[in-house]
Image (spheres, rainbow, N blue to C red):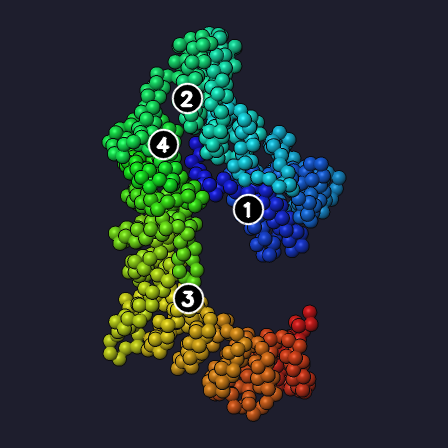
């Protein structure tokens, strides 16, 4: 049995939008392949986009299907709006006489690429009808079928939707349409979910995952009128009782009758329906043994237990007493669980959540205390479903903005449960739901809800944070993604500080994992690691030594890395104090961090470091200026060129990257002014090297005036200079630049 879980956001997933998006991306990929070939990197990159769309669909259904009917293209049985994408894709299909295509969501990018490559090729010969079928068979591609029986069943016998008209195309609405209004159909879908796929498809004509169907059935059941349910079930049970000794007269077997009745667990009026069912069957004269076979004796026990729970809840929330007997509720609720009444237990929790979201303060407090009792079931693994159901409901209430302040206590209680069980995957899912009610602006977290803010503030628990950090060091790598999401949700300086203790860990994997989290913590990481850089104790070293001791170096290096990864201008303040540190490694790391941070403050510091006594540092700083700078900084670079002759070629290259009028004027004058060339050359740079770098820089700027100056310069070179002397390199460079610009 599948164990896929679905959230409210999943159920609102718009199939119409994804159908149109998939058609568009499949056509674009096919077109790219037809132009560039399947092996071209651009085509391969484009194919990845439809593949990602199919990957999203895999959560809900087995196939993505295309079908041509009545001159229109259908995707996912949804009629696609006419466009160049749909028309051209139909043209590709019709060339090969393809009426329908189904893509198994398990297909690979390689299989999709091969298929699209064959789809766009011109058809040769008369046997075009079987071209694609033979191609798929020859290449052993089983995840794509054309003109198949499965495709015909999905389209011809399945429901069709008009995606070119307004409507509700959510997963909930589309799957709900397949349910119809038949209670027996709902029971049958639930009972037959373990059927082999081919049989399931033949019976229900859809390929949505049974787990999704199972998730949505309770919603559908709860909408059916009690009287209608009672009458439908009584009729089926009565048919069983007419001649039970002759199986040929039985329209439905006993297990299907039980399935009908088991669905009542999802109906809010279950007790009323069961009472009416018993009266109806008695009136019709159904033998007691038949009734007992379908509704075992435990049914009476279950009914009694449910009645006691309902009476307790009525008295608690609607009676006159203000006292809350938690022991009595614990006994009633435990009996529900022991008698296997999961549906009723979930209904009780849902009712309590509704009271928790209500306007009555007293009712909210009572609901919180009772929900705390239900959470105590986490000690028994058989009742984990209830904990997960509370988490699912929390997601729904948070998504709908229905949480009250008391929700913060429930969230915190659930966090502690999951943490004690080390169910980090579930805790991560809960954290993701909380993150949806937050947004980050200028590095500051803004909360849409006081309850969410309080819950997240409660996460700032040193014991919990340290345990999660220990899990990074000593735990399984497979759980890292969940732990990362949890700690990022916590988002506090305490988290950043705890992680700072392992950024220099001996394990490279541990260091990398810590840095990944720290780079997403925003201001919290900025404050912690700015303090590390500003603390002089971290830069102490033996007298006469330039380099930091290893332990301090690793801490400093990683702190600088985090400040760069955060890309926050405030990080420049801490880095500014260390740009003259004697350790070359520190200065080199600062240059790399400033390049990532970018902005005016970072550029100012890089220009200072461009004067570093170590040429490696100065060159790295100049390169970084070229990568993140703007034409406004050109005058400073020109001044630098006049003062740092060993780095002049690197500065010239940077001027070409930045461009602008001032850069062009300087480069043009440098190209023709022999005195300026002599002034800027050094024992490491010849005049020809200077002019060659200048030509390339002008070519990088590439505007009309720059190209004209390159041509003028090249024309001044004599034939003998071009052939025999150093100017031959200049001639080739000039011609190469001019020829590329003419293309």
* Horizontal relation, residue 526 to residue 50: left or right: left
* Vertical relation: 662 (above or below) 14: below
* Horizontal relation, residue 612 to residue 675: left or right: left
Q: Residue under label 4, please give it.
A: 348
Q: Badge 3, how many Cα within 10 Å: few under 14, some, many 20+? A: many
Q: Badge 1, how many Cα within 10 Å: few under 14, some, many 20+? A: some
Q: Badge 4, how many Cα within 10 Å: few under 14, some, many 20+? A: many
Asked if the residue at tag 4 contacts the one at tag 2, i.e. Cβ–Cβ closer than 8 Å, the answer is no
Q: Residue sitting at 56 percent across and 50 percent down?
A: 49
Which comes before the other along the chain, label 3 or label 1? 1
In which quadrant of the rendered view does residue 98 lie?
A: top right
Viewer-side residue, 696 vs 621? 621
Which comes before the other along the chain, label 4 or label 1? 1
Asked if the residue at tag 4 contacts the one at tag 3, i.e. Cβ–Cβ closer than 8 Å, the answer is no
Q: Residue sitting at 32 percent across and 26 percent down?
A: 311
* Vertical relation: 237 (above or below) 611: above
Instruction: Locate the C terminus and report the quarter of the image it occupies.
Output: bottom right
**Residue 141 seen from this side:** no
Q: Residue under label 1, please give it.
A: 53
Q: Residue under label 2, please give it.
A: 272
Q: Residue under label 3, please give it.
A: 568
Which comes before the other along the chain, label 2 or label 3? 2
Q: CA distance from mark 3 to mark 1?
A: 34 Å
Instruction: Locate the N terminus and report the quarter of the image it occupies.
Output: top left
- Residue 407's x, y, as percent? 35, 44
Q: Residue sitting at 52 percent across and 10 percent down?
A: 249
- For marks 2 and 1, give the one nearer the viewer: 2
């Amino acid at each position: 049995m599948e164990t896929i879980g679905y959230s409210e956001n999943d159920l609102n997933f718009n199939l119409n939008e994804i159908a149109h998006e998939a058609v568009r991306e499949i056509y674009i990929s096919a077109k790219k392949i037809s132009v560039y070939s399947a092996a071209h990197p651009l085509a391969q990159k484009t194919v990845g986009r439809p593949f990602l769309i199919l990957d999203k669909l895999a959560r809900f259904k087995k196939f993505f299907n295309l079908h041509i009917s009545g001159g229109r293209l259908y995707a996912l049985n949804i009629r696609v709006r006419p466009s160049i994408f749909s028309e051209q894709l139909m043209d590709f299909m019709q060339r090969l006489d393809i009426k329908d295509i189904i893509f198994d969501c398990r297909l690979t990018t390689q299989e999709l690429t091969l298929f699209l490559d064959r789809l766009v090729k011109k058809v040769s010969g008369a046997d075009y009808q079987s071209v694609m079928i033979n191609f798929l068979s020859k290449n052993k591609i089983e995840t794509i079928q054309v003109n198949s029986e499965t495709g015909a069943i999905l389209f011809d016998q399945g429901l069709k939707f008009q995606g070119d008209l307004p409507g509700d195309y959510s997963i909930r609405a589309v799957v709900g349409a397949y349910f119809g209004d038949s209670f027996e159909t709902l029971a049958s879908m639930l009972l037959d979910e373990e059927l082999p796929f081919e049989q399931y498809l033949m019976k229900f004509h859809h390929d949505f995952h049974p787990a999704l169907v199972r998730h949505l059935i309770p919603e559908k059941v709860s909408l059916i009128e009690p009287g209608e349910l009672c009458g439908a079930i009584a009729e089926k049970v009565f048919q069983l009782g007419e001649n039970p000794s002759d199986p040929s007269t039985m329209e439905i077997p006993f297990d299907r009758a039980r399935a009908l009745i088991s669905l009542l667990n999802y109906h809010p009026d279950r007790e009323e329906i069961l009472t009416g069912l018993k009266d109806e069957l008695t009136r019709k004269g159904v033998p007691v043994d038949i009734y007992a076979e379908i509704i075992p004796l435990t049914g009476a026990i279950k009914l009694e237990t449910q009645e006691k729970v309902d009476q307790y809840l009525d008295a608690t929330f609607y009676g006159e007493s203000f006292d809350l007997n938690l022991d009595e509720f614990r006994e009633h609720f435990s009996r529900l669980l022991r008698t296997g009444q999961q549906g009723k237990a979930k209904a009780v929790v849902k009712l309590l959540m509704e009271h928790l979201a209500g306007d009555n303060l007293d009712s909210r407090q009572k609901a919180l205390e009772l929900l705390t009792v239900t959470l105590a079931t986490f000690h028994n693994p058989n009742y984990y479903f209830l904990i997960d159901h509370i988490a699912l409901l929390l997601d729904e209430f948070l998504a709908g903005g229905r949480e009250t302040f008391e929700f913060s206590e429930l969230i915190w209680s659930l966090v502690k449960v999951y943490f004690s069980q080390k169910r980090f995957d579930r805790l991560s899912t809960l954290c993701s739901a909380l993150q949806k009610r937050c947004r980050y602006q200028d590095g500051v977290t803004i909360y849409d809800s006081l309850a969410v803010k309080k819950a997240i503030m409660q996460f700032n628990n040193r014991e919990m944070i340290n345990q999660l950090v220990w899990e990074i060091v000593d735990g399984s790598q497979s759980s890292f993604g969940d732990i990362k999401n949890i700690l990022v949700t916590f988002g506090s300086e305490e988290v950043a500080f705890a992680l700072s203790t392992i950024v220099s860990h001996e394990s490279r994997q541990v260091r990398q994992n810590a840095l990944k989290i720290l780079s997403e913590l925003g201001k919290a990481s900025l404050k912690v690691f700015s303090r590390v850089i500003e603390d002089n104790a971290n830069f102490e070293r033996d007298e006469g030594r330039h380099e930091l001791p290893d332990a301090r170096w690793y801490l400093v290096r990683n702190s600088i890395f985090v400040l760069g990864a955060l890309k926050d201008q405030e990080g420049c303040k801490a880095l500014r104090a260390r740009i003259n540190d004697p350790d070359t490694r520190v200065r080199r790391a600062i240059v790399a961090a400033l390049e990532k941070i970018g902005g005016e403050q970072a550029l100012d510091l890089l220009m200072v470091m461009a004067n570093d006594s170590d040429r490696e540092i100065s060159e790295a700083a100049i390169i970084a200026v070229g990568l993140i700078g703007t034409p406004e900084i050109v005058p400073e670079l020109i001044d630098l060129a006049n003062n740092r002759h060993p780095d002049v070629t690197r500065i010239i290259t940077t001027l070409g990257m930045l461009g602008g009028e001032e850069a062009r004027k300087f480069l043009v004058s440098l190209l023709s002014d022999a005195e300026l060339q002599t002034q800027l050359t050094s024992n490491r740079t010849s005049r020809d090297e200077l002019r060659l770098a200048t030509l390339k820089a002008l070519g990088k700027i590439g505007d009309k005036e720059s190209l004209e100056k390159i041509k003028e310069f090249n024309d001044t070179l004599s034939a003998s200079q071009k052939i025999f002397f150093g100017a031959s390199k200049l001639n080739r460079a000039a011609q190469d630049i001019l020829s590329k610009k003419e293309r």
